[in-house]
Image (cartoon, rainbow, N blue to C red):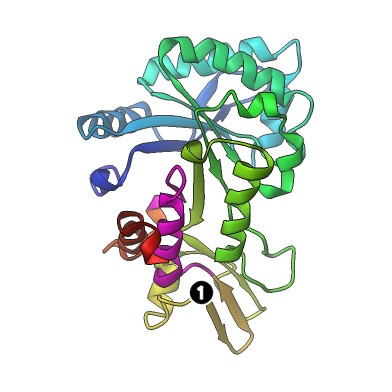
Amino acid sequence: TVQGLDYDALTHVAVAFANPTGPGDAVVVGDVDDAQVATLVEKAHENGVQVLVSIAGASHSEEVRAQLEADKVDAFIASIDALIDKHGFDGVDVDIEGGSVDETYEPFVTKLAAVVRPKGKVVTSAVGAWFADSISDRALWCFDFLNIMSYDYTGSWSEPGDHASYANAQKDVVYWTSKRNYSRARTVLGVPFYGRGWGDQCPLKYASFSAIAAAYPDKTAQDWIAEGECQISFNGTATMTKKGALGSEYGGVMIWEVTQDTDDALLMNALMAGVRAGPAAE
């Protein structure tokens, strides 16, 4: 993955995820060893790309939330700071989601920014419509930029439907920049390199774009597949180009996640065609 990344198309890479190994434990990067992280940081820096570490994630937001209590949060932040120093990360991405974004969120991000920003480190956040109202204005202004998770509007918890439509992408960037008055230049549109599937006979309930392309090679330009009882929603190359153009009007584009593309970077190439063409691509 490290060697295959198109660094010319990237400004930041976020390593996901780093979380405590247990209550009160230090924060560690999961599923990779120190040597792998070091290789990524070295290669990225050689290409002028910053490397952030992401904390929490949807699956670990509750356990991270437990570290945000007043008697634990300072030690938790110190652990994040130490991890950044250990690996030479350029900052931290806060990906606490859903109900775990509560009254502890603002004090946490305020303290986190106060610790790492004086060292020249970046603080960003992954945000979604489903918990947007829980994020205070003061918390928002702690971040150098926002990564809008404009996807998962549908899934296994809902009826079949577009999980990452272009219309919702437009609504999401407008919400953060108009209703919340966040800077356009710091508002980053998140796009999915994966799809959601429905149907008892559908093997692709959560599938990378590469898996979808392998199963349906003649349908990579579209956003919807319906064959028998199997229905799959994703962003094909045409919509990805439009989203790239939309992101170029704001702070850029964030991908979840880059390793889900085909080996020949079919989706990344479509996305970057839109980014580089700008609004005319729409």
Q: Residue at x 60, y 81 (%)?
A: 230
Judged from this view, the residue extending furthest toward the bottom is 228
Residue 64 colored magenta?
A: no
User: Left or right: where does residue 111 sit relative to residue 1?
Assistant: right
Q: Residue at x 43, y 68 (%)?
A: 211
User: Left or right: where does residue 249 sit relative to residue 23?
Assistant: left
Provide the residue span drawn in magenta: 234-258
**Mark 1 — residue?**
223
Residue 235 colored magenta?
A: yes
Q: Residue 237 location in percent, x, y?
A: 39, 69
Judged from this view, the residue extending furthest toward the left is 46
Q: Residue 119 location in percent, x, y?
A: 42, 11
Residue 249 sits above or below residue 85 on the image: below
Q: Residue at x 68, y 23 (%)?
A: 138
Q: Amino acid at mark 1?
A: Asp
Residue 30 sits above or below residue 195 on the image: above
